[in-house]
Amino acid sequence: MADELRLVLIIIGALVLGALFLHGLWTVRKNSNKVQHRYHPEGDSKDERPGEGFDEYGIGQVRVVKGAGKGQAEQRSKLVPPRTATKPTSRPIDVKRPAEQTDLFAEPKEPVLNFSALDENSISEQEGQLPEDTDYGYDEAAEDEQTQEGEAGPSEVLILYVLVPEQQQIGGQELLSVLTMLGFKYGDMDIFHRHQDSAGSGEVLFSLANMFNPGTFDIERMDELSTRGLSLFMTLPGPGEPLQNFNLMNNAAKKLAEE
């Protein structure tokens, strides 16, 4: 059925294109015929003029009047006054002073400050008033932190999802017992974290959040929780060996999927 519909559409499109082509060709020929009829040959111009000597556009025949050349030339000579030769002005041109040209798009010049008028005694007095043990706010530790942050590359996030079928749910109490066995601790952002030490000390290696809204956990109401998915994620670079941390997160995801 689809092939037949496609064939019908192709035939209709070909017919439409052919009709457009024939219509355009007919229009071009029609316009060319109008242009040829507008400009008639010289042999037929006399027959098409009406009896009064005007053609269809209201233009009469050209008539040559003899003997009027001299009279018109004399009248033109009387009307046109004789031209007087203009003498060049003898006023000297001052070439030593070129005209000042201002550039409208030039950048404004910065004002030049002259510090020669400052009193050296006043400057020395102000310098003498400064305490010797003045702290100018230079912090080496802050500079080292900024240097370390600049050297660190852009962070990446690796995410693993644990999703159960639509007919199943992950219970809160069962999830809490499995997470406790895997060494997760409930902490910041109301989600679970896996630290370097299974007891909950050290830096965070990876975290676990609810895959569905609100994305967090209420530790006091875990018995009422039910969800279909969990998200485990870790940030790179992180503490320790990245490959070892990823294997640990992958094993935790497999354990959650089995339970």
Image (cartoon, helix red, strand yellow):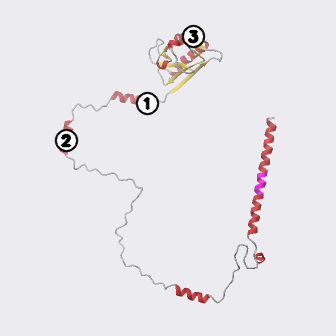
Residue 124 is marked as 2
Where, by quadrant of the figure, is residue 7 drawn?
top right
**Label 3 sits on what residue type?**
Glu
Residue 28 vs residue 175: left or right?
A: right
Q: Nearer the viewer, mark 2 or mark 3?
A: 3
Asked whether 54 or 81 is in front, the reply is: 54
Q: Are marks 1 and 3 in contact (CB under 8 Å)?
A: no
Q: CA distance from mark 2 to mark 3?
A: 78 Å
Residue bearing the label numbered 3: 174
Residue lying at the far front in this picture: please name it.
52
Q: Position of residue 204 (x, y in %)?
A: 47, 19
- Segment tinted magenta in the rendering: 19-25
Residue 117 screen position, x and y as percent: 22, 50
Q: Main secondary structure of the magenta part?
A: helix
Question: What amino acid type should be assigned to the residue bearing mark 1?
Answer: Glu
On the picture, is 7 further left or further right than 182? right
Number of labels in the image equals 3
**Position of 167 relative to 125 (above/below):** above
Q: Is 249 above or below relative to 44?
A: above
- Tell me if residue 183 can be seen: no
The N terminus lies in quadrant: top right
User: Disc 2 on helix, strand or loop?
Assistant: helix
Q: CA distance from mark 2 to mark 1?
A: 43 Å
Closer to viewer: mark 1 or mark 3? 3
Sequence-first disc among 2 and 3: 2
Q: Is residue 140 visible?
A: yes
Other residues around mark 3 within 10 Å, as few (<14) / some (14–19) / many (≥20): few
Residue 253 in percent (x, y) is at 57, 16
- Residue at figure coordinates x 78%, y 58% from the top left: 26
